[in-house]
Image (cartoon, grey):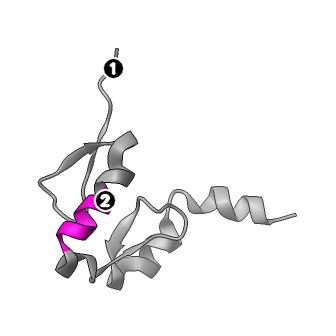
């Protein structure tokens, strides 16, 4: 069995979280770190993508999940 890939928590870079638990971990970290959370925003294409507010537009322009959603809106 292959080990699951670990994601880095955007609220605390020392946290390494399995991808299937990231959403729950982010909610917990957001509550524990309110000062950091005020400076962060969620990507509209993937809620598990949490980036600094200043970088949100840049992230959303290049988000890997963007094409899947944009393709679904066409037609």
Q: Nearer the viewer, residue 58 or 5?
A: 5
Residue in the picture at 40% in, 62% down: 49
Give me the residue at 26% from left, 59% from top: 28
Q: Within the image, what quadrant is residue 27 found in?
A: bottom left
User: How far across and how far down the image is residue 51, in percent?
Assistant: 33, 71
Q: Which residue is mark 2?
A: 26
Q: Is residue 68 magenta?
A: no
User: In the drawing, does residue 51 fall left or right of residue 66?
Assistant: left
- The reply to whether discs 2 and 1 touch (Cβ–Cβ < 8 Å) is no
What's the distance in space between the residues labelled 2 and 1, CA to CA? 24 Å
- Residue 64: x percent and y percent? 51, 57
Magenta highlight on residue 30: yes
Binning the other alpha carbons within 10 Å of mark 2 as few (below 14), some (14 to 19) or many (20 upward) gives many
The x, y position of residue 62, in whole percent, is: 49, 67
Quadrant where the C terminus is found in the figure: bottom right
Q: Mainly helix, strand or loop, the magenta region?
A: helix
Q: Residues within 10 Å of mark 1 (few under 14, many from 20)?
A: few
Q: Which residues are magenta?
A: 26-33
Q: Name the residue furthest right.
A: 75
Q: Circle 1 — which element? A: loop
- The dot on residue 65 is none
Q: Quadrant of residue 58?
A: bottom left
Q: Which residue is the site of mark 1?
A: 2
Q: Quadrant of the N terminus?
A: top left
Residue 26 in picture, x, y percent from top left: 31, 59
Please tell me which residue lies in front, 32 or 54.
Answer: 32
In the displayed structure, would residue 33 be above or below residue 5?
below
Q: Residue at the far left: name it.
A: 14
Sequence-wise, the earlier of marks 2 and 1 is: 1
């Amino acid at each position: 069995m292959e080990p699951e890939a670990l994601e880095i928590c955007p609220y605390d870079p020392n946290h390494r979280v399995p991808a299937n638990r990231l959403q729950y971990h982010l909610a917990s970290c957001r509550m524990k770190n309110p000062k950091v959370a005020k400076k962060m925003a969620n990507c509209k294409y993937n809620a598990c993508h949490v980036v600094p507010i200043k970088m949100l537009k840049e992230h959303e322009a290049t988000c890997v999940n963007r094409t899947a959603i944009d393709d679904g809106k066409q037609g």
